[in-house]
Image (cartoon, rainbow, N blue to C red):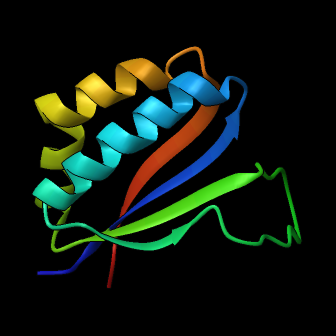
Amino acid sequence: MPKAYWIAHVTVTDPEPYALYAAGATEAFAKHGARVLARGGRLKALEGESRPRNVVIEFDSMDAALACYRSAEYQSAKAHREGAGEAQIMILEGV
């Protein structure tokens, strides 16, 4: 079964509630066996639109990644992110 990768591109506009989101999301990721591969590190945009914060999180499968996103823990954390930034989030299945 291929792994899956949660990829997020974010512009934070209100750091305080976003910090609450990040803390809650981190707990949800841990509960679902996720491994953070990149989070907010140095970025060099080469083509197209970019955002200042980028995250890549590995899951054992697409089902595991979707279960995390749909979980009560993540949805509770997500409520803090809404209005605290702009985000593009996707889950990509690996090869």
Please give left or right for residue 62 compared with residue 8 in the image. left
Residue at 89% in and 72% down: 46
Residue at 68% in and 23% down: 14
Q: Residue furthest top?
A: 83
Q: Residue furthest front?
A: 16
Residue 58: x and y in percent read 32, 72
In this rendered view, identify the residue nearer to me: 40 or 45: 40
Q: Quadrant of residue 1?
A: bottom left
Q: Quadrant of residue 76?
A: top left
Name above or below for residue 37 compared with residue 63: below
Q: How many marks?
A: 0
Name above or below for residue 21 compared with residue 67: above
Locate the C terminus by quadrant.
bottom left
Please give left or right for residue 62 compared with residue 15 in the image. left
In this rendered view, identify the residue nearer to me: 44 or 39: 39
Residue 88: x and y in percent read 57, 40
Please give left or right for residue 65 compared with residue 12 in the image. left
Q: Residue furthest bottom?
A: 95
Name above or below for residue 95 compared with residue 17: below
Residue at 85% in and 57% down: 48
Q: Quadrant of residue 71?
A: top left
Residue at 20% in and 80% down: 2
Please give left or right for residue 18 compared with residue 2 in the image. right
Name above or below for residue 29 compared with residue 60: above
In this rendered view, identify the residue nearer to me: 26 or 83: 26
Residue 92: x and y in percent read 38, 63
